[in-house]
Amino acid sequence: MGLLAVAVCWAVAGPAAGWSALIGAGAYFAPNALFAARLLLGLYGPGNASPLTFFLGEAFKLGATLVLLAVAAHWGRGWLVWPALLAGLVCVLKGYMLLFVWRRP
């Protein structure tokens, strides 16, 4: 979904919008991928997973997303296209819901 947002933003509003959408999508996708990898390592690793580990991972994921968005806002002041950035972010956030809908039983 994030790549779809990047392609649409790039086609409609140009390269700056495409890069902005990519940054928005990556700001949530990267911490979420790290969190998923950590959960998989905990599942197959030697230790037991606890609810505290899950909640700390969620807190890290949300904090990392906020930090990445703040860094993008600071560094991209002159060229960042905010609607495209938010479109990329929302598409990645809602892309997981589409996985549940389209998942085959």
Image (cartoon, rainbow, N blue to C red):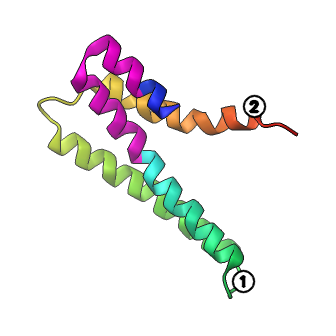
Residue 7 included in the magenta stretch of the image: yes
Q: Disc 2 on helix, strand or loop?
A: helix
x, y percentage for residue 72?
25, 43
Q: Extreme right residue here?
A: 105
Residue under numbered circle 2: 102
Q: Residues within 10 Å of mark 1 (few under 14, many from 20)?
A: few
Give above or below for 25 relative to 10: below
Q: Which residue is mark 1?
A: 48
- Where, quadrant-wise, is the C terminus in this rendering? top right
Total marks shown come to 2
Magenta run includes residue 22: yes
Looking at the rendering, the stretch of residues picked out in magenta corresponds to 6-27
Between circles 2 and 1, the one closer to the viewer is 2
Q: Above or below — where is 9 with respect to 96?
A: above
Graded by Cα atoms within 10 Å as few (under 14), some (14 to 19) or many (20 or more), the crowding at tag 2 reads few
Residue 48 drawn above or below residue 101:
below
Any part of residue 105 in sight:
yes
* Apparent side of residue 31 relative to residue 104 in the rendered image (left or right): left
Of 99 and 87, nearer the camera is 99
